[in-house]
Amino acid sequence: MDPVTQERATEERTREQQAPQERAPEPLTQHVQRITRRVRAFDHRHPLVWDLHLTGFWVTAALIDYYGGGWLNVARDRDNPGWLVLTLSLGLSVPLLLRRTHPRAVLLAIAPFALVNAWTGIALQAFLLQLLVVFHLALRRPHRNLWWATALILASVSVLATRHPQGSPDQDIVPVLMSIVVAAAIGITVRTRRDHTEALEDRARRLEIERDQQAQLAAAAERARIAREMHDIIGHNLSVITGLADGGKYAAAKSPERATQALHAIATTSRQALGELRRLLDVLRDEDHPRAPQPELTPQPTLSDLAQLLEGVQAAGLPVHTTTHGTPTLPPGRQLTVYRVIQEALTNTLKHAGPGTTASIELSYEEKGAVTVTVTDTGRTGPAHLTHPSGGRGLPGMRERTALYGGTLEAGPRPHPEQGWRVHLHLPEETPQ
């Protein structure tokens, strides 16, 4: 079996193994939750529809109780006119339409009908609809409203127990009081759960916003790092190539051999720059595809690569003198910072210092990873040399690398009467983690 066919067979077997899991029925709780979410979403968009349906249900139940004569089974005084019973049935149920938006007003509107219901002894069971209003008071209003609501409801119950007693008074008052407590407890529980859910949703939104902000900051930092690396790679090599080309142009008329050497150095430097750029772009390429080729990785330059750097700079026509104090014992990250700062300083010298310039590098290694680097040149300090480093990416890139280790970087003209430019880097001792 060829590899392609074998891979397709493996994918089909994987799909067959996963198919039963995908076809498995969902738990009943998920169906209930999904239906509940849909009902809540519809109620949020069309609250009046739900209010009309619920109010219509209770009004219908109250009217059935009236027309069916069911109220006679619990009435304590049956000698009351039918119009009064109908009025009380509607008065105890119709105001429920506004129970969610104005629960206090609804309870006050129902209270007179409940009081008449108790005074006359009709004792309609519709007076228990006040428990729905108590639920919404506990759900939507400050809890102190429950005290006067309870007193208002028990007032009518007390009137009924006093004017039309049926057993001891506690047989009328205690069941209603317990019902009020249950309705209030349900409202408080739903409110607590709702507030907790809203708090979790708000926290999730804030975390999502924070995650997006962190991603944006990370992307910006990565773009800055990529720009800094490309500047260090391309800028330095192009400066070396420019210096070699200028030197080859002057040497072509007098010494063709020197011109040939310059062209050879230009070709070598260009290939190196192209190779480094290709490796950087390979790393940035999307590697999600399993068959994508792995990028060619090389270690970042260290202080051991300074000799090769100086050779390229000297080949471009800039004499460099190096002085070293102490023994280098720096970790790779600090070595990269020192290397890039020296590279950028020499690159700026090649670009802006002018012909006949020399440069010197002084490195002082101290204990615990501290290091001091001073790069000076003898070039001109005119506008070209002053303006470009501060207006381009070179100096900000050096400062960013220095700030990573809490160091300091100074760049500017050498003090009078000396001529040239000076870059001074100091990285302090490593702090224990």
Image (cartoon, helix red, strand yellow):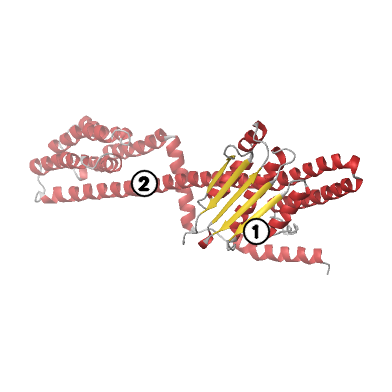
Tell me if mark 1 has few (under 14), some (14-19) or many (20+) residues whose alpha carbon lies within 10 angstroms of its own: some
Q: Amino acid at mark 2?
A: Arg
User: Can see residue 108?
Assistant: yes
- Please give left or right for residue 407 compared with residue 15 in the image: left
- Counting residues from the start of the chain, the first of labels 1 and 2 encountered is 2
Give the structural element (helix, strand or loop) at label 2.
helix
Q: Position of residue 5 (x, y in %)?
A: 81, 64
- The image quarter containing residue 128 is top left
Q: Which residue is mark 1?
A: 303
Q: Which residue is located at x 24 percent, y 34 percent?
A: 104
Quadrant location of the N terminus in the rendered image: bottom right
- Please give left or right for residue 85 compared with residue 233 in the image: left
As measured in the structure, the alpha-carbon distance from the residue carrying label 1 to the one carrying label 2 is: 62 Å
Q: Position of residue 425 (x, y in %)?
A: 56, 49
Q: Nearer the viewer, residue 78 or 233?
A: 233
Q: Nearer the viewer, residue 232 or 40?
A: 232
Q: Position of residue 378 (x, y in %)?
A: 67, 41
Q: Amino acid at mark 1?
A: Leu
Tags 1 and 2 touching, CB below 8 Å:
no
Q: Nearer the viewer, residue 221 or 388?
A: 388
Mark on residue 194? 2
